[in-house]
Image: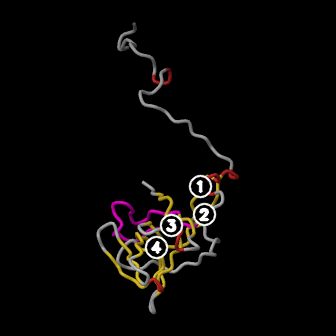
Amino acid sequence: MAPNQLPVTHPAPEDRPPPWPTLTVVISEDSDLVRIPILGTASAGNGHGHAYSLDAEDGDDAVYIDQREAQGRELLAVRVKGTCMQPLLFEGDVVICERVRHLDQAPSGSLCVAWVVDDDDFGGNVKYVEWASESTARLLGEDGTTKVVPRSRLVVQGRVLEMRRKL
């Protein structure tokens, strides 16, 4: 052994596997993914989200899911704004929803994106929707906040299926 050289008692790092499990990264063909445009923001706080169009698909902001998960579903995505859904949802999270065409697609207690139609505002909310009676609904936050609205002014756009968060 040469002076100033330490004895080698283990294989070089490139010659041995890491001590943790490894994952194989599979790069998918674009045709395996479905693009879901992020249509706007929905409030998870006391305020209101910004009105957005369900037909808007020309924005650059989007999320992608596997086509097998999207098959047969009409999907939309919105970015969360506000804090009343913490610790479940945080500001900046994106929720992917299945479009609701009939209220039976959003059973009481479902996490939904819903518009409350007011005289002065028309914006989205991400809340649990509880059908309180024939004429009223409650929008419930994870923090215990509740907003009671007439069912006639509540338009459920989508039932949340998935959340995406950037770390």
Residue drawn at x 38%, y 79% as measured from the top left: 47
Which segment did they paint magenta? Answer: 76-96
Say whether residue 163 is magenta.
Answer: no
Q: Residue furthest top?
A: 1
Dot 1 amino acid type: Ile
Residue 118 x, y percent position in the rendering: 45, 89
Dot 3 amino acid type: Arg
Q: Of marks 3 and 4, which one's residue comes earlier in the chain?
A: 4
Circle 3 crowding by C-alpha within 10 Å: few under 14, some 14–19, many from 20: many
Measured Cα–Cα span from mark 2 to mark 4: 16 Å
Q: Secondary structure at mark 1?
A: strand
Residue that badge 1 annotates: 65
Q: Judge from the rendering whether residue 68 lies leftward or rightward of residue 136; answer left or right.
A: right
Pointers 1 and 2 in contact (C-beta within 8 Å) = yes
Measured Cα–Cα span from mark 3 to mark 4: 13 Å
Residue that badge 2 annotates: 36
Residue that badge 4 annotates: 42
Measured Cα–Cα span from mark 1 to mark 2: 8 Å
